[in-house]
Image (cartoon, grey):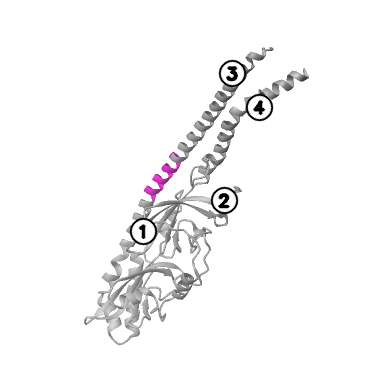
């Protein structure tokens, strides 16, 4: 329908308003979709965080209970007259055999990994594994911190890879006193295998790290003796000299250092190569997979317990967990907002009308 020229400005204004209203409607619709996505993502993250925090408390309680169960054992055993005699009197093969048998019996009852006695120089002179192919008797363990702590008259504790057995364990130690002096040290070694097996049935990954970030207890076997993030050369040298983890060449879960305070939560990105089960399931994953990391310290042991929750499904559904992944959305919003009022001006400018009038 042709309009007289006097009505063309009204027609342009009317259509311009409709374009503007339509543009605003599109913007409002996109914004509402974005806002729903933000709320959903936030709710999902809070749900995962809350559930993980509750699980973390259970895991920490489990670990404390396991340690407390054996904490007093070396103190009790250190008062055994048979053991006191062994370290305070001249060495005797028959006495050593009696002690070996008693250590073997107690080790079986307590379900510990090994129990052994060191003389004042740190050399093992009796052990529960004296019959086995790998016996601690004759080993010089004076370099171990648990010996150095106990020989000073204080209970000791330490986690390390066994130098002889090559089996990980937590070591509890206590001084053996004779006539008011420290004459020897008794050591109880405990494995954490039962704990790891129980933890492996959970949906989260649980790891325990030392103060350097080395993972020595884990529910996920491929991460054993890995580190959360890269270690500097000075730290690596300290760990090698301590022989705590044997010939130590750790792999890193993350490409950058991981720093998190006790009780905090953070999103970290684990290298895909450190998650072999994704490859086995044939899942296509990015180079770095997001996980929610929450931590709780165990000051007495010098450890930190971490729980890691896979966020890859959250990312697939709701975008980046690091923040609101809205750059693309806002680009569309801006485009719609800027295009809406300009479209009618381009289509119905006076210049355009004259041109069409001249060619009709």
Task: Give the Cα separation between the discs numbered 4 and 2.
Answer: 53 Å
Q: SS of the residue at dot 1?
A: strand
Residue 147 appears in the picture as rendered: yes
Task: Give the Cα separation between the discs numbered 3 and 4.
Answer: 14 Å
Task: Give the Cα separation between the discs numbered 4 and 1.
Answer: 65 Å
Q: Please identify the residue farthest to the right as the structure is shown.
A: 359
What residue lies at 39% left-to-right and 45% top-to-bottom?
50
Q: Tell me whether the residue at label 4 lies in contact with that at label 1, contact meaning CB atoms closer than 8 angstroms.
A: no
Task: Give the Cα separation between the discs numbered 1 and 3.
Answer: 67 Å
Badge 1 crowding class, 10 Å Cα cut-off, few under 14, some 14 to 19, many 20 or more, is some
Q: Tell me whether the residue at label 1 lies in contact with that at label 2, contact meaning CB atoms closer than 8 angstroms.
A: no
Which residue in the protein does label 3 denote? 14
The mark lying in front, picked from 1 and 2, is 1
Tell me: residue 157, above or below residue 42. below
Pick whichever of labels 4 and 2 is earlier in the sequence. Answer: 2
Pick whichever of labels 4 and 1 is earlier in the sequence. Answer: 1
The span shown in magenta is 43-55
Pick whichever of labels 1 and 3 is earlier in the sequence. Answer: 3
Which residue in the protein does label 1 denote? 297
The secondary structure making up most of the magenta span is helix
Magenta stretch holds residue 161: no
Which residue in the protein does label 4 denote? 346
| Near-viewer residue (3 or 212) | 3
Image quadrant occupied by the N terminus? top right
Badge 3 crowding class, 10 Å Cα cut-off, few under 14, some 14 to 19, many 20 or more, is few
The mark lying in front, picked from 4 and 1, is 4
Q: Which mark is residue 278?
A: 2
Q: Tell me whether the residue at label 3 lies in contact with that at label 2, contact meaning CB atoms closer than 8 angstroms.
A: no
Q: SS of the residue at dot 2?
A: helix
Image quadrant occupied by the C terminus? top right
């Amino acid at each position: 329908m042709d309009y007289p020229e006097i009505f063309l400005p009204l027609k342009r204004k009317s259509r311009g308003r409709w374009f503007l209203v339509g543009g605003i409607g599109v913007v409002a619709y996109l914004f509402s979709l974005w806002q729903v996505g933000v709320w959903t993502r936030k709710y999902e993250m809070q749900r995962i965080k809350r559930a993980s925090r509750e699980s973390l408390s259970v895991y920490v309680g489990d670990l404390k209970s396991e340690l407390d169960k054996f904490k007093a054992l070396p103190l009790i055993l250190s008062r055994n007259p048979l053991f006191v005699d062994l370290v305070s009197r001249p060495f005797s093969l028959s006495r050593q055999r009696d002690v070996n048998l008693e250590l073997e019996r107690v080790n079986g009852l307590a379900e510990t990994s090994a129990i052994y006695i060191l003389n004042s120089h740190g050399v093992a002179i009796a052990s529960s594994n004296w019959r086995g192919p790998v016996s601690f008797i004759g080993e010089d363990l004076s370099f171990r911190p648990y010996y150095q702590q106990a020989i000073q008259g204080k209970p000791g504790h330490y986690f390390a890879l066994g130098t002889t057995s090559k089996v990980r364990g937590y070591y509890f130690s206590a001084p053996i006193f004779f006539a008011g002096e420290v004459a020897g040290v008794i050591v109880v070694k405990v494995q954490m295998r039962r704990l790891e097996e129980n933890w492996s049935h959970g949906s989260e990954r649980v790891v325990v790290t030392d103060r350097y970030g080395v993972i020595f207890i884990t529910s996920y076997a491929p991460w054993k003796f890995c580190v959360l993030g890269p270690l500097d050369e000075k730290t690596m040298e300290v760990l090698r000299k301590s022989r705590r983890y044997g010939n130590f060449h750790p792999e890193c879960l993350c490409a950058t250092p991981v720093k998190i305070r006790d009780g905090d939560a953070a999103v970290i990105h684990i290298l895909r190569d450190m998650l072999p089960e994704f490859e086995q399931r044939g899942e296509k994953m990015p180079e770095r997979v997001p996980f929610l990391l929450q931590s709780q310290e165990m000051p007495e042991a010098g450890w930190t317990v971490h729980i890691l929750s896979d966020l890859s499904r959250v990312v697939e559904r709701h975008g980046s967990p690091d923040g609101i992944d809205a750059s693309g959305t806002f680009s569309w919003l801006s485009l719609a907002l800027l295009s809406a009022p300009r479209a009618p001006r381009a289509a119905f400018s006076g210049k355009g009308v004259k041109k069409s009038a001249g060619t009709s």
